[in-house]
Amino acid sequence: MTYEELKQRQNWTLEQKIDHAVVVVSSFMDKVNGNLYASVSGGKDSGVMFDIIRRFVNKDVPAVFCNTGNEYSEVVKFVRNTENLTVIRPNMNIRQIIEKYGFPLISKEQSRYINQAKHTKSQKLLNTRLYGGKKGIGKISERWKYLIQAPFDVSEKCCDFLKKKPFEKFHKQTGLYPVIGTMAGESRLRLQKWMKHGCNSLETNLIASYPLSIWTENDVWAYIRKFNLPYSPIYDMGIKRTGCVFCGFGCYLKNDRRFYFLKETKPKIYEYFMSLENNGVSYKEALRYCGIDFPDSMYRQLTLGF
Ligand code: SF4
């Protein structure tokens, strides 16, 4: 698949995209002999994906939600109303993960690169992270290179322990394969995955279906309106994403208000996550070190006095 093909398909009508998603899931269902489940997060995207499966493909497909303990309570409450739902849990909690591996900051890709550059013993890998490999790929962005010297670690490992491993365990126990409601246009990693595997990945280590790959956020909202689908109340509170409330991936982007929302809506939970530590440095201090705009940033402290 190519980027141009994605762009072209993103221009399809909603009806074409629904038909396409139905074909993708149905073909995946054949490939895995009906052994599939819908991975739901309580968010609008996985909600739409699950609705497509139940409405147009098979209403008996089960849904699975991994309760990491770090989501908005409104999301957990909402997802618990899903029919035919299994709730799974991780073995480690976020305090242990952050203590051991580091904070989920900047982006999944960049935090992994920075962590590798800090800890690798391989000069080759270090060079790739500093200067880029073939075609300059795999490089830490200039903006974040100083984090190699930070007195704390950044890491994407939380995703492995809080999401990936519990779902792998579920697969081993049940033999079911996931259908996932992510979109290729959401991040570079997801785009690369789609360009490699398309909407159904049948590679041994990654057997999964992604029927919404070619969708956009507008399509998801259009589908919700078309079928009058219920969705988590957090979107009407102004929160744009589900997942862990404290997640720092993408928090450096302009006008990102996630930490403001968290402090305003759940002040105790905000303080709890801000107190988590890696290498003796709190999350609050790490966010300041990264120059992130959040309620306790240095700028606000110095200029506004709070
Ligand atoms: S949502 Fe963020 S913090 Fe939570 S597991 Fe995924 S990357 Fe880690």
Image (cartoon, helix red, strand yellow):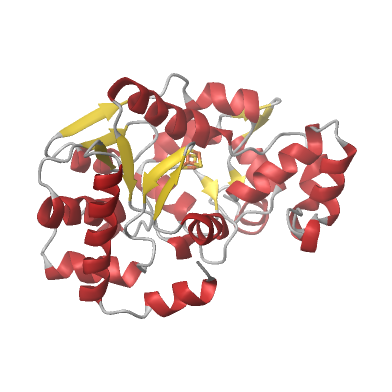
- Left or right of 66 in this view: 251: right
Residue ranking furthest to the right: 123
- Left or right of 156 in this view: 78: left
Residue 146 locus on image (x, y percent): 81, 49
Question: Relative to the observer, which residue lies in front, 98 or 221?
Answer: 221
Whether residue 38 is visible, yes or no, is: yes
- Left or right of 208 in this view: 302: right
Instruction: Please tell me whether residue 237 is drawn above or below residue 214 in the rendered image.
Output: above
Residue 246 locus on image (x, y percent): 48, 42
Instruction: Please tell me whether residue 19 is drawn above or below residue 77 in the rendered image.
Output: below
Whether residue 230 is visible, yes or no, is: no
Q: Residue at x 32, y 37 (%)?
A: 177
Question: Relative to the observer, which residue lies in front, 174 or 279?
Answer: 174
- Report the number of discs: 0
Which picture quadrant has residue 23?
bottom left
Which picture quadrant has residue 77?
top left
- Left or right of 282 in this view: 32: left
Residue 236 locus on image (x, y percent): 25, 60
Q: Residue at x 75, y 38 (%)?
A: 116
Residue 47 locus on image (x, y percent): 23, 52
Question: Relative to the observer, which residue lies in front, 234 or 133?
Answer: 133
Q: Which residue is drawn at 30% across and 45% down?
A: 31
Instruction: Please tell me whether residue 22 is drawn above or below residue 287 in the rendered image.
Output: below
